[in-house]
Every structure is written in C-alpha cells, then in structure tokens.
Image (spheres, rainbow, N blue to C red):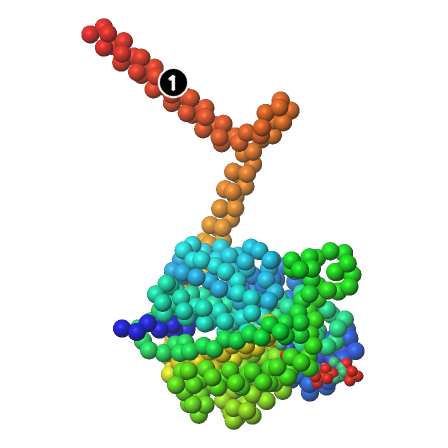
Amino acid sequence: MGRYAQIIGWGKSVPNHVLTNEDLARIVNTSDEWIRTHTGIRQRYIATDPRETTATLAIKAAQEALRVADVPASRLDMIIVATASPEHIFPSTASLVQDAIGATRAGAFDLSAACSGFVYALSVARGLIVSGSAEYVLVIGSETLSRLVDWSDRSTCVLFGDGAGAVLLAASEVPGGILSTVLGSDGSGGNLLIVPAGGSRMPACLETVASGMHYLKMNGREVFRFATRVMARAAQEVAEQAGLTMDEVDLLIPHQANRRIIESAMKQLKLDESRVFINIDRYGNTSAASIPIALCEAIEEGRIKQNDHLILVGFGGGLTWGAAAVQWSVPLPLPETPWWRAAQRSGSFHMAQMRSLGRRALRRLQGITVRSEEGNGRQPQPILEESLQKLRAHLWKVKTSKEEATSSEEKTT
Ligand SMILES: CC(C)(COP(=O)(O)OP(=O)(O)OC[C@H]1O[C@@H](n2cnc3c(N)ncnc32)[C@H](O)[C@@H]1OP(=O)(O)O)[C@@H](O)C(=O)NCCC(=O)NCCS
C-alpha cells in the first residue's frame, strides 16, 4: 500500500495594518504609479504593533489550519516554520508555535531558505511522511520582513509585506497529495539578497547598526534576471517528475515577488491568467508566506477543486528555488463546522495557553528556589534540595528508630 502526503488543512493570517502605495509615497521618494507598473503591488499588510511578530502570525495561521482539518495539535509529529525573519536566532519560531498551540508530541524546527522556504519545508514534510517517520506535519511560512527593511530605501521598502500561511500534511493511503518536489540553490549569488549583519559573520554592534548593515540589501535587477530564469524551469521540471504536462496543470501558484516575474513565467510556460493565481497587488512580497497565503486565497475564491493538479513554485535569497506538484484531494468547499466543534477546538488552544503558563510558572518556582547564602561562605543551596535532604534525614530517623524498636522487641522475646 502506497503512502502519500496529503494537504488536509490550511490557514493564513496577516496583520491588521494596511500600508498603501500612497502611504509609502509619503515616506520615501516613490509613487503609486511607479510601484504598480514596476511590481504590480497596490498595498501590503505591515505588523506595526510590536506585539505582532513572526511567531504570533504563525500561531494564528497554524490554529486555522488545525481547525480546517479538525485535527488536535496533540497529534502533530513535526512543526516546520519556514522564515527569513525568525523571532530570534534561537529558540526557533517553530518551538514557540509548538508551545502556543499545545503540540505536546511534536518536534519543531525553523527552515531557512528565504522566499523558497515554504516549498523546501513542504518537501521535507513530504519526506517525513512518505518514509513513515511522521503522520501529521504542520508546515508554516511566516514573515515580518518589515522589521528587516530599511524604510528609507525606496528600492526595497515598497516590495515587502508581512503575513503567515500554514498547511497541515497528513499521511494517507489515497494516491495524490504532494506528487514531486524540485529544490535548488546557487550560493554564488548569496550577496544579491542579504541581511549582512546580525549573524555570526558580522555580529550586531553599534557600527553595524550605524551603517545599516542589519537591513535587507538587494540587487533588484540581478534577482529579477535570476527569477525569470528559474521560475519556469523549476515548474516545468516538477511537472515532468510528477508525470504531468503543463496542459494538465490546473493552477500555478507562484511566489508573489513581482507581477512582471510571474508574467514572464506564464509566457515561458504558455499559461494564461485563468490558470495562474496572483494576489501580489494586495499583499506585496511576503517571502516564505506568499505561497501558502496565495493557496488559501485560491481555495477561498473557489479556484481549486478536488483532483486538480497544482504547481507551487518559489525563488529567493540563497539564491534558492523550489517547486512542488500537488494533486488536491480534499473536496471543496468544505462543509460548515458545527459551532460546538469550533468551540471545542478554540477551547483546546486556550488550554494550551494555560498549560504553557503553568509550565513557565513551575520553571520560575524551581528557579526561585536558589537562595544565596554567600554571606556565610556556603555555596547557594536550592531550597528544594535542602527540603529533600531534611526529608531524607527524617525518613532515615524513622527507619532507624523502627529498626531499634524491632531489635529491642526481638531481645525481650
Ligand atoms: C526591485 C525592482 C522592482 C526594480 O525594478 P526595475 O525595473 O528593475 O528598476 P531599476 O532597479 O532598474 O531602477 C529603475 C529606476 O527606478 C528607481 N527606483 C527604484 N525603486 C523605486 C521606487 N520605489 N520608486 C521610484 N523609483 C524607484 C531606481 O532608482 C532607478 O532610477 P535611476 O534609473 O535613476 O537609477 C525589480 O528589479 C525587481 O522586482 N527585482 C526582483 C526583486 C525581488 O523579486 N526580490 C525578492 C526575491 S524573493
């Protein structure tokens, strides 16, 4: 019996704040006309609230994907967050998601492949499932690139937006799901799209901040040339690997970086707009989140039906590229979820929050038990350890007095 990795849940999340091209024209020397004609972007969502982060967006998208699939977080085996703007260098954003949604059995890690990250993560998740190592894998693309963008650099700040998208993959005996994947990298072009400082090569310091090296830097023209070369090629390759001709592809869901790049791929692949999903006008480039957000919107708009063949294709920093061929298996539209089921699911997320708070409180309590006794020259002694020692001494006393009593009883008899 074959084993397949099927997409059974999906969800997206974007910040509330919409930044239009007109808004941008008030910040840098640009215009709505320039941005629309050069990129196809009209607006993007930006996480202006500092409480809104890559992790919080990822958590919302993940919860939605679990709700759609009606699978409890406790059944997840692995969580992969593809991101170029992780919450921290470590811990991984995936571990924060794992804790927040209550995925108590799941492993978690971040995947760094810039805008190709989501397709890379799909490929890894498929491998885990097909090899029998996992039953359920949550794949998330989440970004707050607005935090890495230099808001005085008009050549980059107009391009990016924030958001997250997630899919839940499940092991299935039903043929279909992720049929094939193609991944590639050309590290010789790493400098074309880079955040130079903040890593181990150039740790963050006053100079790196003063010279703006902690911001995203891009050679737009070179990245453009690279993208128009690899997008169509990767899509073609992945279709061939899945045994599909381009005529059999129902919908291409490309990474939304620039409308002109997408149009170039459409031309090379001889696909018209009815078979390509484009939403860059409303989101801008959300990096690793762009493909899952587009997938969710394509579902919402009724552009996908059961047994459709999809191709997801991305490219980005690294340089990297990736494509996945998918046979869609879930009947759409989904039936309405009964209210009590939805309530049950959101109740389980509240429980996860309580559990996380409980674990944090317990850890703090254990930490507080360290009492400084430096004044009298002794090493700090954990109170718990001290209590344990007292308990042990007491038990020892009880034991020896019992033994004494027995031996004196034996003597008298
Ligand atoms: C960034 C990009 C939109 C620039 O478009 P372009 O047509 O290549 O524009 P150029 O870089 O050739 O610049 C043309 C002019 O527009 C100017 N310009 C750049 N950004 C501008 C802006 N936001 N508003 C107005 N003018 C702008 C440039 O300064 C340049 O002016 P100059 O000729 O006086 O020097 C395009 O190169 C691109 O999309 N590249 C790929 C980026 C990408 O996909 N990155 C993410 C990968 S995941």
Q: Is residue 413 left or right of residue 143?
A: left
Quarter of the image that includes the N terminus: bottom left
116 relative to 86, above or below = below
Q: Amino acid at mark 1?
A: Lys
Q: Secondary structure at mark 1?
A: helix
Where 72 falls versus 257 (above or below)? above
Is 320 on the left or on the right of 218, as rendered? left
Which quarter of the rendered image does ligand 1 occupy? bottom right
Coordinates of residue 164 in the picture (x, y in percent): 55, 69
Q: Position of residue 126 (x, y in %)?
A: 41, 70
| Residue 392 appears in view | yes
Q: Give the class, few, some or many, for how many residues have Cα within 10 Å of label 1's Cα (few <14, many ≥20).
A: few
Residue located at (56% from left, 88% from top): 265
Q: Is residue 16 shown above or below 96?
A: below
Q: Residue at x 69, y 77 (%)?
A: 219
Label 1 CB-ligand 1 distance < 8 A: no
Q: Residue at x 27, y 11 (%)?
A: 407
Question: Which residue appears farthest toward the top when viewing the image?
Answer: 412
Asked whether, in this view, residue 200 is left or right of residue 366, the answer is: right
Seen from the viewer's position, the closer of residues 131 and 154 is: 131
Which residue is label 1 attached to? 397
User: How many discs appear?
Assistant: 1
**Residue 290 in the figure: left or right of residue 130:** right
Q: Residue furthest left?
A: 413
Q: Nearer the viewer, residue 340 or 216?
A: 216
The residue under the point 45% across, 56% down is 102
Instruction: Specify the quadrant that holds the C terminus.
Output: top left
Instruction: Using the rendered view, name the quadrant where residue 7 is placed.
Output: bottom left
Image location (x, y in percent) of residue 208: 74, 60
Residue 310 seen in the figure: no
Counting from the top left corner in percent of width and height, residue 280 is at: 60, 81
